[in-house]
Amino acid sequence: MRLLHTMLRTGDLDRAIDFYTRVLGMRLLRRHDYPEGKFTLAFLGYGDESENTVIELTYNWGVDKYDLGKGYGHIAIEVDDVYAACAEAQRLGATVVRAAGPMNAGTTIIAFIADPDGYYIELIGKRD
């Protein structure tokens, strides 16, 4: 068994794809419209789906916003330098929710940014 993808609903698919590709450096792997179901799926990631876990963005036609609820936590992405990655994400227009620095009660360097729909993404420093 392996983890295939994490699905997030988005109110603006093009805006979300731009964020995940431009700010986080993912590639758009595939995108498909489902006219009968009135939705579009886009899959993004850092490598081929046959070997990597990816993000599935779901756009339900005509829905422009979702309540994120209390159950969702965040997506975590490992980066070489959290301070630099956080600064670059902010320069590219991302919202920094928690600036880069040591985690509470620990030494691992982390930061949190939000995607255009408000989903949190944790940037975690690469461990030696």
Image: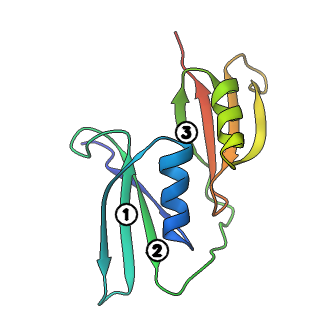
Is mark 2 in CB contact (under 8 Å) with mark 1? yes
- Callout 1 amino acid: Ala
Q: Please give the name of the residue rendered at 48% of the width and 59% of the height, measured from the top-left corner.
A: 17
Position of residue 77 relative to residue 73, above or below, is above
Residue 107: percent from left, percent from top: 72, 16
Q: Please give the name of the residue rendered at 60% of the width and 48% of the height, measured from the top-left corner.
A: 74
Q: Please give the name of the residue rendered at 49% of the width and 67% of the height, measured from the top-left corner.
A: 14
Residue reaching furthest left?
Answer: 50
Disc 2 is placed on an element classified as strand
- Label 3 and label 1: CA atoms lie apart by 19 Å
Q: Quadrant of residue 11?
A: bottom right
- Callout 3 amino acid: Ala
From the image, state whether disc 2 or disc 3 is nearer to you: 2
Of residue 36 and residue 68, the one placed in the foreground of this image is 36
Residue 100: percent from left, percent from top: 74, 29
Disc 1 is placed on an element classified as strand
Q: Please give the name of the residue rendered at 67% of the width and 72% of the height, measured from the top-left corner.
A: 67
Query: Residue 76 got which mark?
Result: 3
Q: In this view, does 44 lie to the left or right of 126?
A: left
